[in-house]
Image: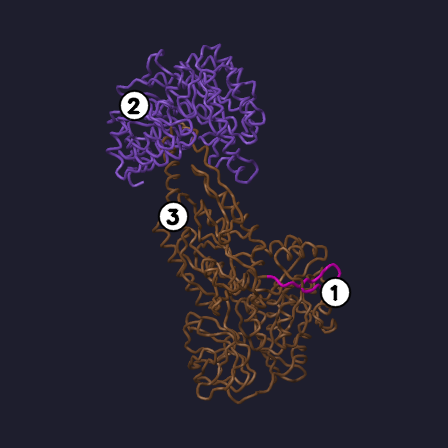
Chain colours: A purple, B brown
Amino acid sequence: MADLERYSLPLAGESSIGSRTPLAEVAAGSTARPEGAYIHVPFCRHKCHYCDFYSFVDTQDRQEAFVARLEDELEHATDLGATVGSRLVTVFIGGGTPTLLRPPLLARMLAAVRRCLPLAPDADLEWTVEANPETVDAEIAAVLAAGGVNRVSLGAQSFDPQSLRALERDHRIESVAAALGHLREAGITNLNLDLIFGIPGSTLESWRGDLEAALALEPEHLSAYGLTYEPNTPLATKEARGEIEAVEEDLEASMYEDACNRLAAAGFERYEISNWARPGRACLHNLLYWRNRSWLAFGPSASGHLDGLRFKVVPRLGEWLDSKDPWPLSEWERLDEHGAFGEELMLGLRLTEGVDTAWLEDRLARCDAGGERRRALESALADGRLEQIGTRLRLTQRGTLLANTLLADLV
Amino acid sequence: MKIRNFSIIAHIDHGKSTLADRLLQATKAVSDREAREQLLDSMDLERERGITIKASAVTVNHEVDGERFQLNFIDTPGHVDFNYEVSRALSACEGAILVVDSTQGVQAQTVANAYLAIANDVELIPVVNKIDLPAADPDKVAMEIEQVLGLPAEDCIYVSAKTGRGIPELLEAICTRLPDPRPARTEHLRALIFDSIYDDYRGVIVYFRVFDGSIKTGDRIRMMGTGRTYPANELGRYTPRQQKVNQLGLAEVGYMVAGIKNLGDVRVGDTITLESNPAREPLPGYEEPRQMVFCDFYPSTGDGEGGRRADFESLREAVEKLHLNDASFTYQTQHSEALGFGFRCGFLGLLHMDIVQERLEREGGVEVVQTAPTVSYLVDLHEGATVEIHNPSELPDPSTILAIREPIVKLEIICPTDSIGDLMSLCDARRGIFRGQKFVSDGRQMLEYELPLAEIIYDFYDKLKSMTRGYGTMDYEIVEYRAADLAKVSILVNGNPVEALSLIAHRSNAELRSRAILARLKKQIDRHQFEIPLQAAIGTRVIARETIKAVRKNVTAKCYGGDVSRKRKLLEKQKEGKKRMKMVGSVNIPQEAFLAVLEQSE
């Protein structure tokens, strides 16, 4: 870790009022032109057992305080000059459950985004909001559409009641179709469904059922994530105690391969390890991540990236609300060239488009003193985890399932 | 003044220490105000575990019918891991009080202790204790004592050490029922060392009993076993306060400070005589301490090279310091491919091992990783020599071996009658030889078995406790080394033997044990990009096999909402983890895999 430059946050207090955080310094002088913005809304009606994003059930009704504080943060970013000369082509409001905000507050938040951030014209803008199917009714759908949102990502996760129970997921299966209906009626027609495979108790048959049910709803985009047992989640605890049993690795692999085959047959293209879209419908915001572009981040625990500088907003709502610093960050780091190259490989190889070989050679020449990365790449090419198509180097399907065996040697 | 030398022996928690305190109080050696709980046990650990680890001796006076008695109370370790030390302490006595809890009855340790006393020709006074408790059934317990140990029920004295009931009767019995010490057999000094402790300020304090002759302050003495000589700088006794004296005579008990720096220089059972006028023969019964159970200790935390070295140093310090206080365990530096630097230690028995481990952690302040215990083996070679080994890797080339001998114990179990069947199956499965069965009382029986020590150090006691719902007790004593059909089992990962995982097993259960080990290993080694066979083999013959399938899926699904740093750190962690693993051939074996095999017993 010696290769990365790391700062510690100045203690919150009088001294930081009016002064600029190191990020502000960097942002002000940065040549980065952010192309997107991520906004994190931490509220949930119920905490699902697999989730390790920052979210909680708010018992103090701090929705209004949240929106007011977010407005400050957005305005401040503009003041800082973080957005000078840039035009944002994506906005992604994630959570938590953004659609849990009461309609007037949701509208106010969307208006603030539009007011404060230099958004591209509507035709060039992808504006996504994440939603729990249960929270989307006609009113919410109308508020989203009126606010400028043109893409919604619904956490369907599974269409199997037993699997939903295993995840402690708090929605009814039929609410997914209903939510899609409300959104389409409101004019939002770029829709994603999130699915999770490898849920304890699931089988290849139940997973195929999930895929069919999702396809029947005709989304433009599908994400299929293998269930991850994140540390400190109830799910991981239950697994450690033996109360639930993770599905066999082989079954999980078969589920993934099944998804690849079935979705390809249905006309979806896999453009990233866990993401499929109809042609032209890949999520532009997520592509910013994988292509290592710059984006801003707002709201507690949100992560952003400005031309090599990675940063994170303070992770707790209370701390964030109370902070005297208008854009309170908890961590930031700028990797050296060697580290940054590792990250770019880690991100780029997740994409079906892979990485450019000329770029790769250039970087290897400069950032691979021990030859460790080249050896790892060559061995993956030799054993069929990597393939070269024209001037692009990318993971094969087998390599996709074993991505970490390669990426761990490249970071 | 007549002298009575005696000990108290009991099963754990039957009230030995409370009784000792009460006796001291009753003789006014300790005032009521001064009386504190369990005066003789000086270590926290001892009090917590309810056992006495190190002996000391206390002298008090008592009068019966106008006749004055000097009572020398010699404390004994409470467990037969310290069998030899107990037997030396008992041989310094003419009598012993056998304490049995009136709510618990005769237990395995009661029997083992009583046998040891009888073997040392010590007169027993059976005492039924805790008669103040509502659940007490003293008559039944007295019958058990008669039934199992052959001591007449009517000889039992009923006592409550807590309330003091029966204490005067017991004191009187000590004076009147125990025999006089034997007369001198030579005029030369012969004194038996029955204990020694290390004092930070005065060095080693030696406890002894004079059998012949006498010793004066300033005498130059010689230890007949080790041949070392020392000046007897200070003599004294504990009353229980320390009291210096100028001379200790026939049959008396006391301590000596003689400028001895190292506890290892003093051997329990050795005979003290005068350098100027030595006895010709030492007192009988001296033996070298013998370590029967072995395990490795490694520092438990040790991320990074620097951290590991620092921790090993603090472990070394703790081990060396503890050894000053307990010379009966041995230690030598050990380097494991998997666990780094540590110590291989030898112990008198399993309890001794637990105590050392706890004291290292508590007094030494180091956390240790302890490997599964093994026993010592004697290997007879064709060329006539015998070597002792404590580690499978020390086993000589099989073609040179005539026989491998292992320690055998005599085991006593006292248990509820309804668990006899289960326990007999357990003993059979552990290569036990049935030696006898005795009626204890309604609903309780005693079983006697001979078993290899190696078979009881593997979770035998836990199984016994669960089979008897906690009511069963056991005790054992090592009787001999016996040849058995033992072999070294090698563990091979992807065809490469991993020496740190090898074991010595009996051929009859080598397969079963190997399979359990391979199953554990399989859980701990990550899938690789190729299939990995795990094998257990005796020589070239494979006796068990498992396969770790090739990895099919190892990919992070999520993008963590753009938290790229987090994702990178996860991968870096994976990479770091791989670096810390032990490469065997082309397989990465994590430290946890070694521990899973070495730490667990079954």
Query: Is residue B343 placed above or below B583 in the rendered structure?
Result: below
Residue that mark 1 sits on: B140
Three-letter amino acid code of the residue under disc 1? Lys
Secondary structure of residue under mark 3: loop
Q: Does the magenta stretch include residue A119?
A: no
Q: Residue B285, how many percent across, how many down? A: 55, 77
Q: Residue B496, how many percent across, how many down? A: 43, 48
Three-letter amino acid code of the residue under disc 3? Asp
- Chain containing the residue with disc 2: A
Three-letter amino acid code of the residue under disc 2? Thr
- Chain containing the residue with disc 1: B
Secondary structure of residue under mark 2: loop
Residue B159 numbered tag: none
Please tell me if label 3 and label 2 are on a single chain.
no
User: Which of pointers 1 and 2 indicates the residue nearer the eye?
Assistant: 2
Q: Looking at the picture, tell me which residue is in the foreground, B448 or B366.
A: B448
For residue A299, which quarter of the picture? Answer: top left
Circle nearer the N terminus (1, 3)? 1
Q: Residue B276, how many percent across, how many down? A: 44, 88
- What's the CA distance linking mark 1 and mark 3? 58 Å
- Chain containing the residue with disc 3: B
Secondary structure of residue under mark 1: helix
Residue that mark 2 sits on: A391
Disc 1 to disc 2: CB gap under 8 Å: no
Residue that mark 3 sits on: B303
**The magenta stretch spans which residues?**
B435-451
